[in-house]
Image (cartoon, rainbow, N blue to C red):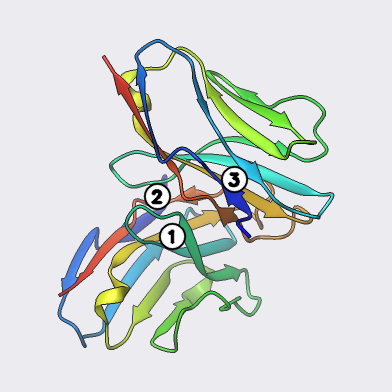
Amino acid sequence: GAGVSQSPSNKVTEKGKDVELRCDPISGHTALYWYRQSLGQGLEFLIYFQGNSAPDKSGLPSDRFSAERTGGSVSTLTIQRTQQEDSAVYLCASSPWGLNTEAFFGQGTRLTVV
Amino acid sequence: AQKITQTQPGMFVQEKEAVTLDCTYDTSDQSYGLFWYKQPSSGEMIFLIYQGSYDEQNATEGRYSLNFQKARKSANLVISASQLGDSAMYFCAMREGSWSNYQLIWGAGTKLIIKP
């Protein structure tokens, strides 16, 4: 596709359920990032994938969070046993390599845990 | 200490006026990069402009310019001739170290509202 695509755009889930968020980066982009944005806040880094290298998971807030990237393209962020504090917008971005100039962002998934 | 500080949580500006959005940063690295992104209500982050720490001239992209004052550690975004479509959240971000460092540090953002 022409841009970074994220699905679903909105997700309401009950506390304790698992959710999967999907990111389809721009074709050919080797770097992929997940960020979390809470209401009125800046972006919080979650995880970074670069090509076939081991991902940098240092930003994941707990072991309930995990992410994978299959075939160097599509990525899935999974949150297990969701909590109300997980409610936020989850943004995915991709860039051709690292972050020398700019990253291209998707429109995000708004997650609401009730 | 905050690495990126945006002191204006919100701003109202009359259409066609110029706007300056403040950003100050804190780093001990000699090599770093500064970014501005726009986030409209639709949610996506849109890259606006980039300034490298070794760039001698202020970056410009159309109506956007970055007023880079290295000694003051400020990187203010200037929007000339503001338009209604400029209403959005604006985020300043910094990459520390070399260009291969992939992590950005983000400010809390400024909400800009352009009045007709």
Mark 2 and mark 1: Cα distance apart in space? 15 Å
Pointer 1 or 3: first along the chain: 1
Asked if marks 2 and 1 fall on the same chain, the answer is yes
> Looking at the picture, does residue A31 appear above or below residue B54?
below
- Along the horizontal axis of the image, is B70 left or right of A89? right
**In which quadrant of the rendered view does residue B116 lie?**
top left
> Looking at the picture, does residue A96 appear above or below residue B47?
below
- Along the horizontal axis of the image, is A36 left or right of A101? left
Mark 1 and mark 3: Cα distance apart in space? 13 Å
Q: Are marks 2 and 3 in contact (CB under 8 Å)?
A: no
For image coordinates 46% across by 63% down, the residue present is A35
How many marks are shown on the rendered structure? 3
- Along the horizontal axis of the image, is B20 left or right of B45? right
For image coordinates 55% across by 34% down, the residue present is B22
Judging from the image, mark 1 belongs to the subunit labelled: A
Q: Give the crowd class for mark 2: few <14, some 14-19, many >=20 residues within 10 Å.
A: few
Pointer 2 or 3: first along the chain: 2
Q: Which mark is residue A102?
A: 3
The x, y position of residue B39, in whole percent, is 39, 41
Q: Which mark is residue A1?
A: 2
Say what amino acid the circle numbered 3 marks: Glu
Residue at the spot of label 1: A92
The image quadrant where one finds the C terminus of chain A is: bottom left
> Looking at the picture, does residue B31 appear above or below residue A88?
above
Say what amino acid the circle numbered 2 marks: Gly
Asked if marks 2 and 3 fall on the same chain, the answer is yes
